[in-house]
Each structure stands twice: as C-alpha cells, then as structure tokens.
C-alpha cells in the first residue's frame, strides 16, 4: 500500500512534467509562428515543476535514488556505515517532519487570510502550499522507516558495486 501511494505520486509527477513539456513546446511553436498562445502557460508551468519535484521526492527516497553524498561513509567499515546511514535517515526524517509541520502552518495561514496569487491566472495562494506538508510528511515517514530498518536498505553496496561513488 505504501509503495503504491508513493508510486501514484510519482506517476502524477510524471504526468505533470509531460503536460508541462507539451504546453511549453506548444507555446514556443505558437509564438514563433505568430499563432495564439494562452498567456497562462508560463504561470502553470512555473508552479507545475516544483509540484512535480515534491511529488516524486518520496518515491525517489524509497528507491534509494535520492541525492546522497557518501564519500566519507563509503570509507567506513560496513557496520559503521550502516549506523551512519540510519542516523542520517533519522535526521532527514526529523527535518522533513519539521518542514511538513511548517507547511501546515503556512498553508493554513494562506487559507485563512484568503491570500491570492495574481498573475495571468488568479487562484488561492494555499493551492501552492498545500502539497508541501503532504509530500514532506511522506518523505519523513520514509526516512524514519529507513532509520529503523523497515525501508529498503543496501544502496551503499549497490552504488559501490556499480562503481558510481555517489
């Protein structure tokens, strides 16, 4: 169920990126051919790309494809490296939980003040912030799962075996 939820978020992110690519492509062609192009395309893609990034981040974390800087950890004995990985995941889970909590506050404030984003498209500002607490809560849960040993493990060995030295 958990993996399906994260996969669904990633699928939505892929759809958003594909749609943004098509919209921007159309906009470029239409402008160059002096055809009509909706003024809202730039605004929509401006918000679509960070949304897609937020949605795909938990899925990348569960697959071990998130950004890792493990040059020093790769020099440690495996037992110590695993402890550092778990501690790092615990710290990341805590930070993600704090960001999620902060996101709830920002989203709630934008909702209560009825703040608007006014560009070519006008919409409530809380729409921009609403995905933040959801996605960071998913990241926090995944990081904590990894910290306690429930999530996928072994990226270190897989990266070293591939010689990526990430």
Image (cartoon, rainbow, N blue to C red):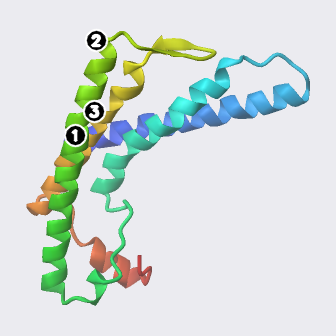
Residue 82 in the image: x percent, y percent? 16, 76
Please tell me whether mark 3 or mark 1 is closer to you in this view: 3
Residue at horizontal 22%, vertical 88%?
76
Residue 31 in the image: x percent, y percent? 84, 27
Residue 104 in the image: x percent, y percent? 23, 28
Q: Residues within 10 Å of mark 2 (few under 14, many from 20)?
A: few
Residue at horizontal 19%, vertical 39%?
1
Question: How many numbered discs, if any?
Answer: 3
Where does label 3 land, which residue? 103
Is residue 4 visible from the viewing direction of this image?
no
Quadrant for the C terminus in the image: bottom left
Question: What is the CA distance from the residue labelled 2 to the residue labelled 1?
Answer: 22 Å
Q: Nearer the viewer, residue 64 or 34?
A: 34
1 on left or right of 38? left
Q: Which mark is residue 112?
A: 2
Relative vertical location of residue 47 with respect to residue 79 in this rendering, above or below: above
Looking at the rendered structure, the secondary structure element under dot 1 is helix
Residue at horizontal 36%, vertical 9%?
114
74 on left or right of 142? right
Where does label 1 land, which residue? 137
Badge 2 vs badge 1, beta-carbon distance below 8 Å: no
Q: Nearer the viewer, residue 128 or 37?
A: 128
Question: What is the CA distance from the residue labelled 3 to the residue labelled 2?
Answer: 14 Å
């Amino acid at each position: 169920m958990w993996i399906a939820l994260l996969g669904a978020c990633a699928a939505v992110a892929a759809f958003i990126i594909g749609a943004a690519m098509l919209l921007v492509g159309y906009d470029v062609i239409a402008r160059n051919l002096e055809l009509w192009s909706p003024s809202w395309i730039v605004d929509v893609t401006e918000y679509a790309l960070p949304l897609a990034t937020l949605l795909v981040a938990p899925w990348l974390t569960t697959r071990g494809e998130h950004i890792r800087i493990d040059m020093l950890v790769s020099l440690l004995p495996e037992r110590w490296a695993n402890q550092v990985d778990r501690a790092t995941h615990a710290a990341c889970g805590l930070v993600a939980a704090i960001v999620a909590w902060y996101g709830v506050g920002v989203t709630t404030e934008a909702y209560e003040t009825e703040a608007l984003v006014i560009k070519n498209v006008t919409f409530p500002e809380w729409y921009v912030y609403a995905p933040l607490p959801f996605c960071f809560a998913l990241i926090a849960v995944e990081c904590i799962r990894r910290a306690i040993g429930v999530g996928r493990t072994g990226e270190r060995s897989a990266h070293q075996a591939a010689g990526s030295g990430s």
